[in-house]
Amino acid sequence: MNDLKSSMADAADAVERALDRLLQLGGDPEDRVIEAMRYAVLGGGKRIRPFMVLSSSAMFGVDRASALRAAAAVEMVHCYSLVHDDLPAMDNDELRRGKPTCHKKFDEATAILAGDALLTRAFEVLADPETHQDARVRADLVLALAEACGERGMVGGQVLDLMAETTDLNMPEITRMQRMKTGMLISVACEMGAILGHASENARHTLHAYAHDLGLAFQIADDLLDVEGSIEKTGKKTGKDQAAGKATFVSLLGVERARGQAKMLSDQAVQHLEIFGEKGDLLKQLAHFVVERDA
Ligand code: GRG
């Protein structure tokens, strides 16, 4: 796991610098929204999704600067979703990544706009020729991210999640909701290396299959942390699902079976990567980290 720890730390540092460069204050009156965007993206988070972009890119020999721009774009979308998810109209949270949520630090309108601008900026970064010289690759990146974010992806999953507060979801419904809400962004993060590196359809499908299992394992681990984790380690309020009376993998399966299911999915994710040999090692280690993490 030492390999993984230092690679994740390197990736986190590099993506922090890329985000900082991409989100510079301009000295204009509208800087307030850029300050809120910077607050939302800089200085926190495990950077799992950027790590997925960078690791899958390394597998196909993608230029590091290109991969970093794609990684930054994915993290912008992730952070936008966190900012909006924390709003009073959604989860109404006050703590995120160990600090006040964006709307608490700034105000609600600024947080909404910062989220909107992060989402938009992510697509601008991907569409910029600096990200890749091949326009087809840029279009594929934009298409893949758009499919993961919209009403058939993350936003749709969030709608189902809000409905879960008043409707009892069963196991297939929860699985579908989580696949849309968190899984699809994780999938696109893993596939971006294949897109940037002109890899075969088969390679991209294999990464998709890996991410599919890993995304579910990630979400079960997140549900377990909501039950067993601490606010000090996770940097966010825990015990929320139970308080909201929401059905989760843990409420339906119980802690032990949920843990077993997460482990099984993470092992299954690793199996998919066998075709890549040693090149898949970091993503394999990540699959174990995701279910063993405490934050
Ligand atoms: C309001 C237009 C509009 C859209 C809403 C809010 C939203 C879209 C979607 C919610 C998606 C969401 C917040 C899912 C939760 C995913 C999750 C488990 C986040 C935590 O991810 P980690 O653990 O966090 O990787 P860090 O902080 O480490 O990056």
Image (tube, helix red, strand yellow):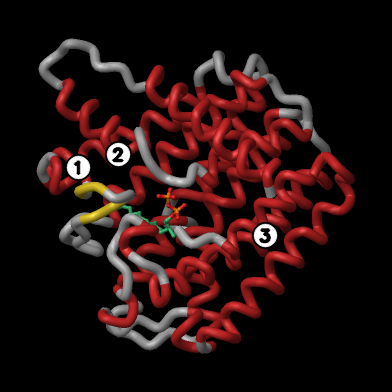
Task: Tell me the amino acid under the disc marked 2.
Answer: Ala
Task: Tell me the amino acid under the disc marked 1.
Answer: Ala
140 vs 103, left or right, is: right
Relative to 268, residue 49 above or below: above
Q: What residue is shown at x 21% (from left), y 38% (from top)?
A: 113
Task: Specify the quadrant that holds the C terminus.
Answer: bottom left
Q: What residue is shown at x 29% (from left), y 79% (from top)?
A: 165
Q: Residues within 10 Å of mark 2 (few under 14, many from 20)?
A: many
Q: Which residue is mark 1?
A: 111
Relative to 293, residue 176 above or below: below
Q: What residue is shown at x 52% (from left), y 84% (from top)?
A: 255
Q: Which residue is mark 2?
A: 40
Please state which of residues 37 and 158 is positioned toward the viewer in this rendering: 37
Q: Nearer the viewer, mark 1 or mark 3?
A: 3
Where residue 210 sits: x, y (%)?
72, 56
Q: Nearer the viewer, mark 1 or mark 2?
A: 2
Mark 1 residue element: helix
Task: Tell me the amino acid under the disc marked 3.
Answer: His
Using the numbered discs, state the Cα–Cα distance from disc 1 to disc 3 in whole angstroms: 34 Å
190 vs 230, left or right, is: right
Q: Quadrant of ligand 1?
A: bottom left
